[in-house]
Amino acid sequence: MSEPEPAGSQVPLRSRTILALGGHEFTRKRGNEAIRDYMLALADAVEPRVCLLPTASGDPAEQIAAFRSSLGRSPCRLSHVSLFRLETESVDLERHLLAQDLIYVGGGSMLNLLAIWRAHGIDRVLRRCWERGIVLAGQSAGAMCWFEGGVTRSAGPARVVEGLGFVPGILSVHYHRDDDRRRALIARAAEGGQRGYGIDDGAGILIQGADAVAAVRAPDGAGSWIVAADGAGGAAETELDSIPLPSPRLAIDELPDEVLELRELRRVAARRGAWSRR
Amino acid sequence: MRQIVSFGGGGFSMESGNPLLDEFVLDLTGEPRPKVCFLPSASGDADHYLVRFYRHFPASRCEPSHVSLFRRERAPVEPREHLLSQDLIYVGGGSVTSLLGVWRAHGIDRILRECWEAGAVLCGLSAGSLCWFAEGISTFHGPAERIEGLGFLPWTNTVHYSSEPDRRAALFDGLRAGMSPAYAADDGAALHFVGDDVAQVVASRPSARAYRVELRHGHVVTTQLATRYLGDEACVPLVRRPEPAEPPEPVLVSA
């Protein structure tokens, strides 16, 4: 399936880009939209081709619909690859993925995600995508998969499962929402040898080559941490300085007075039943 | 007794008004109210599929359950313990490659072999039928291709046989290229294996058939297997459902 990669089509290590998100969904929530817009900007194309891989959740129709509806108004060309549903036309998966500017991997079971990718040979294709400089992004299982390991609940209790290994280190997502995952990461980092990353919902780390070069935070997101052995048998968490992402829509307290006044008028009128809701 | 029932297609997934194949596998367990576990892994544990399973396997007829391998964080029960307690394990359709990948990641392949050897009836359609065999023909991702299964049964399997001519051509090519002798079933037909061998062929549609397809002296030979239509009242099932037991005699418990 894989021919030897011509040297010219590979980009240097530092230009290989991965955006790892601690928790993100394609909803109208402001934080989710801020992350979406940041991610699209990374693709660096006028009309980026964006492909969703919803494998980790078993390719649910809802996740595909949310992705399409959230990105539908942005200038991009959307697609998704389903490894569970029969598609009307068969796609050459390798050619399709290699033609993308951005590949987004959804959350779910990290264990299943990697097992299914390996069964279909997608792991090798994604490595080629990364080597060519296609931006790889994902949340939760879809973020941990790029690392050497991730702290997952795919088989019940939080434990470390091996990832694709493009990025050195172990990632733990939903960091402060799930204390078991945080404890598992700290325990692993305390053993020494491997660096740990902990990312909250609504936050992300930008990786170029093997290094985290920036941390970002949506308006409602918290932060990202590096967890490393402290030399005394434990591990220390160091918060990364996160860049706040701009809000894609005007926040309620930033709205012009006229708009707020009109909304108040509508509210009052609706209570009286005088205006029909348009 | 090791039993596998491999549907060419059919059951609640494909024939929602026709319960004949599903009733057949329930009866095979020999239990009045069998424990039935549905494995929807090949569909990615699709919600709508689970709903349909529970609708067609009501608690009045059996003890239905399912194992989701995508949401294990919400199910503290160990799949091994649960699967080993079942009378019937029913595997749904979808992608056989994804199915086997997920099963192996969770060790379900080894557990299912234990269940089979312990006497649970294993059954399924489409991907859930291909998975039990050494090899199969899958068309899930476009052109028909050879796939490797769990190998509980030492044969090749081809499902949806008469409705998808591409599979037949791929099977013939595969046999000439050295695939093991094959069993093939139409939609609505099911092969009942006891041990490694076919014990009977049953059908939920009068015209559905199953076949043995093999290479003899360089030629592909197809043998149509005798098939029993389950809708015929005159046919008596080989394995009868036990009569309801008499109420037990009161017994004195000695302390």
Image (cartoon, grey):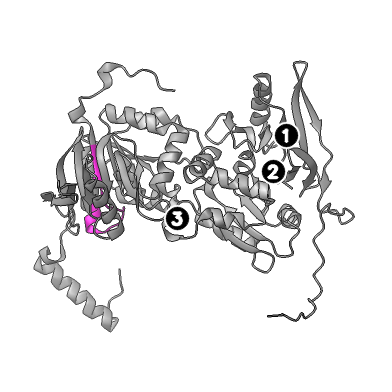
Chain hosting mark 1:
B
Q: Position of residue A229 (x, y in %)?
A: 18, 46
Q: In the image, is residue A25 part of the stretch drawn in magenta?
A: yes
Give the Cα separation between the discs numbered 3 and 1.
35 Å
Residue holding disc 3:
B72
Extreme residue in the front direction: B255
The answer to which image quadrant residue A210 occupies is: top left
Q: In the image, is residue B71 part of the stretch drawn in magenta?
A: no
Q: Is residue B250 above or below residue B230?
A: below
- The answer to whether marks 2 and 1 sit on the same chain is yes
Magenta range is: A18-33
Which quadrant of the rendered structure holds the N terminus of chain A?
A: top left
10 Å crowding of disc 1: few (<14), some (14-19), many (20+): many
Q: Position of residue B175 (x, y in %)?
A: 68, 23
Type of the residue with mark 3: Arg
Numbered tag placed on residue B6 in the rendering: 2
The residue tagged with tag 1: helix, strand or loop? Answer: strand
Type of the residue with mark 2: Ser
Residue positioned 63% across, 49% down in the render? B115
Determine if residue B177 is in view.
yes
Q: Are marks 2 and 3 in contact (CB under 8 Å)?
A: no
Q: Position of residue A127 (x, y in %)?
A: 33, 30
Determine if residue B123 is in view.
no
10 Å crowding of disc 3: few (<14), some (14-19), many (20+): some
Q: Are marks 2 and 1 in contact (CB under 8 Å)?
A: yes
Is residue A160 shown left or right of residue B191?
left
- The residue closer to the viewer here, B46 or B133, is B133
Chain hosting mark 3:
B
Type of the residue with mark 1: Tyr
Residue holding disc 1:
B183
